[in-house]
Amino acid sequence: MQVHIFSHADTYDRHAGRLGARLYARVVEDAAAEDLPDGARVLDVGTGPGRIPRALKAKRPEWTVDGVDIEPKMIEYARGRDPENRVTFTVGDVAALPYPDASFDLIVSSISQHHWADVEGGVRDLRRVIRPGGQVWIYDARFALGKALRAAQKSFDSVRKERKSLLIARLTARA
Ligand SMILES: C[S@@+](CC[C@H](N)C(=O)[O-])C[C@H]1O[C@@H](n2cnc3c(N)ncnc32)[C@H](O)[C@@H]1O
């Protein structure tokens, strides 16, 4: 199911660029600081206009960075902002990710989880595509992370929720 408010990718990007700048910087800094193995592959889920994966690829050019979003117009827009195709942007639902098992060393997601129609299915598929020892970080409104937290507790080795700001928390799930 497509989320129609996100079919106006340029309008979303303009507003989100201002409102989300601090969060994006935090996600990118947190991810870039990770000591991932050579040839690491990182995925941003519900990437929207793709600001996070583009910035991460600029900081860690040696990593392979992907972004996935259910909304085709977002992916079209994200590709347009990345003319050198440094990031691979793909249309897909978090609950049916278009990647083989154990594809990623780190998966991030910002302000997307509360839109997922099937949070349990999404968390299950994140578990499928993360590599052994990898982490999934879901940043979202603090009050909106309960379902994802319970779902992650069923399938990940360790799960914790940390407050990152007044409104935002991060769910960290380790495989
Ligand atoms: C509020 S935007 C956040 C975009 C970006 N992560 C950011 O922080 O600016 C939420 C995004 O999640 C995407 N989304 C919603 N449900 C999804 C799903 N089931 N699978 C993948 N992406 C989804 C929407 O299309 C939208 O682009």
Image (cartoon, helix red, strand yellow):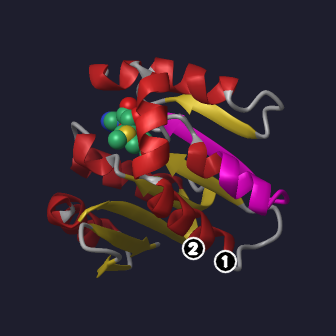
Q: State the image coordinates of residue 139 (x, y, percent, origin top left).
A: 37, 62
Instruction: Return the mark for residue 33.
Output: 1
Residue beneath the point at 48% across and 62% down: 22
**Residue 157: quadrant of the picture:** bottom left
Quickly name the residue at label 2.
30
Residue 1 visible from this viewpoint: no
Residue at horizontal 64 percent and vertical 56 percent from the top = 42
Residue 167, horizontal then vertical, whole percent: 24, 67
Please indicate whether residue 62 sits to the left or right of residue 94 in the image: right
Label 2: few (<14), some (14–19) or many (≥20) C-alpha neighbours in 10 Å: few
Report the Cα–Cα distance between label 1 and label 2. 5 Å
Q: Magenta segment: does it hold 136?
A: no
Which image quadrant: the N terminus? Answer: top left
Residue toward you, 62 or 123: 62
Q: Which range is magenta?
A: 54-69
Type of amino acid under label 2: Asp
> Residue 39: percent from the left, percent from the top?
81, 61
Give SS at disc 2.
helix
Which quadrant of the picture is home to ligand 1? Answer: top left
Residue 45 is tagged as none
Q: Horizontal placement of 90 versus 138: left or right?
A: right
Q: Nearer the viewer, residue 152 or 31?
A: 31
Q: Secondary structure at mark 1?
A: loop
Give 66 or 165, whichever is nearer the viewer. Answer: 165
In magenta stretch: residue 57: yes
